[in-house]
Image: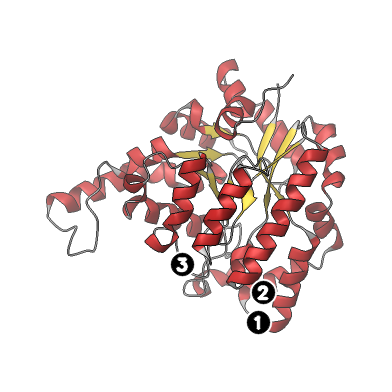
């Protein structure tokens, strides 16, 4: 069974260097976190040396990594530096894909700090660079993509039929202190809480009414939102019946919140390796909406592969989850 892993991180060395410079200039929970991680030689090599991962992929039967720049992304920097880093990273990634076209595919990075330039980069990535979609590492210095100033990015993505992988980020400065204790601000809890908030803002902000064909991808089995779909519909309808939308600053949507999630969002298994949550998400969203991912190098390839190969799935669902859904959504060529 072909295995396409759809949330696999990489980073150019220059990107890591800029974060290390940032950690020397400012002292925040995020800078301290990154300062520790990006000083580990093995961690840096796993992200920056794309050849280094190939033996591990081979050892566990992973056929392809869909590569994307690791969090917190180019959004952490000012608009000029973020744009330059995105351009450089995309050129570097395109070269790696060209060198290993059957092993790697790529998601292009953009810097929403400059929405017009980011929209142009979407077009460049999906055109000449041959990317399979776009990666955005959630919020941009505390701002979210439901703000219409960012919508040129969505316009470009829809025009190019580019799925946007909304990858987790640390909670913004306005929120992070409640998460900074007990190691909760990263993958333990803060990442999922922050990204699910972002997706809910897109839904409740009417983004999918404005862009009905926009495609969003979420890792970690949907950042817990599949569990909340019924509750979201219930509360939205309750407020709507009571005429409370306008007083609460809410928008009248064309559809129920869950309907947007089921029609515009795909999810991956990155970092989630339990049968019960996987089965639940398949039941809630359908077999066409779930894709395999490892979350390399932050998760263990062996564990992720062992989980999916032994998951309690029928043959057709297994085919879709392991590779067919990724082939269709990201327009990855089927195996020869």
Give the vertical position of 120 relative to 129 (above or below): below
Q: Which mark is residue 106?
A: none
Q: Nearer the viewer, residue 53 or 278?
A: 53
* Label 2 packing within 10 angstroms: few (<14), some (14-19), many (20+): some
Instruction: Name the spot of residue 190 as percent of width and height, x first.
Output: 54, 61
Q: Which mark is residue 27?
A: 1
Instruction: Name the spot of residue 124 as percent of width and height, x first.
Output: 61, 49
**Residue 198 placement, left or right of 8:** left
**Which residue is located at x 60 percent, y 73 percent?**
78
Element carrying mark 1? loop
**Residue 237 placement, left or right of 316:** left
Residue topped by disc 3: 143
In this view of the protein, can residue 170 be seen by the observer?
Answer: yes
2 and 3 marks in contact (CB < 8 Å): no
Q: CA distance from mark 2 to mark 3?
A: 19 Å
Q: Nearer the viewer, residue 92 or 139?
A: 92
Instruction: Name the spot of residue 17 as percent of width and height, x first.
Output: 78, 69
Label 2 or label 3, whichever lies nearer to me, is 3
**Which residue is located at x 61 percent, y 21 percent?**
319
* Label 3 packing within 10 angstroms: few (<14), some (14-19), many (20+): some
The residue furthest left is 242
């Amino acid at each position: 069974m072909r295995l396409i892993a759809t949330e696999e991180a990489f980073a150019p060395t220059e990107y890591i260097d800029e974060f290390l410079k940032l950690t020397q200039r400012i002292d925040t929970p995020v800078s301290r976190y990154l300062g520790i991680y990006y000083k580990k030689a093995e961690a840096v090599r796993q992200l920056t040396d794309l050849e280094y991962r190939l033996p591990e992929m081979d050892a566990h039967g992973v056929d392809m990594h869909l590569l994307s720049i690791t969090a917190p992304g180019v959004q952490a920097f000012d608009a000029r530096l973020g744009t330059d880093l995105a351009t450089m990273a995309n050129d570097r990634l395109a070269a790696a894909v060209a060198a290993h076209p059957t092993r790697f595919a790529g998601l292009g990075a953009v810097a929403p700090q400059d929405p017009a330039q980011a929209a142009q980069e979407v077009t460049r990535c999906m055109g000449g660079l041959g990317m399979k979609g776009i990666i955005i590492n959630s919020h941009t210095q505390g701002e979210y993509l439901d703000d219409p100033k960012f919508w040129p990015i969505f316009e470009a993505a829809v025009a190019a039929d580019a799925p946007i992988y909304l990858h987790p980020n640390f909670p913004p400065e306005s929120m992070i202190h409640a998460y900074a204790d007990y190691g909760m601000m990263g993958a333990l809890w803060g990442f999922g809480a922050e990204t699910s908030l972002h997706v809910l803002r897109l839904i409740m902000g009417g983004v999918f009414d404005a862009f009905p064909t926009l495609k969003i991808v979420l890792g970690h089995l949907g950042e817990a939102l599949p569990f909340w779909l019924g509750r979201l519909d219930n509360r939205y309808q309750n407020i709507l019946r009571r005429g409370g939308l306008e007083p609460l600053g809410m928008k009248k949507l064309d559809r129920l919140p869950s309907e947007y999630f089921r029609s515009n969002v795909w999810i991956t298994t990155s970092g989630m390796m339990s049968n019960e949550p996987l089965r639940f998400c398949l039941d809630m969203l359908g077999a066409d909406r779930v894709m395999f991912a490892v979350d390399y190098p932050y998760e263990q390839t062996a564990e992720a592969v062992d989980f999916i190969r032994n998951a309690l799935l029928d043959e057709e669902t297994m085919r879709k989850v392991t590779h067919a859904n990724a082939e269709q959504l990201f327009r990855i060529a089927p195996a020869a």
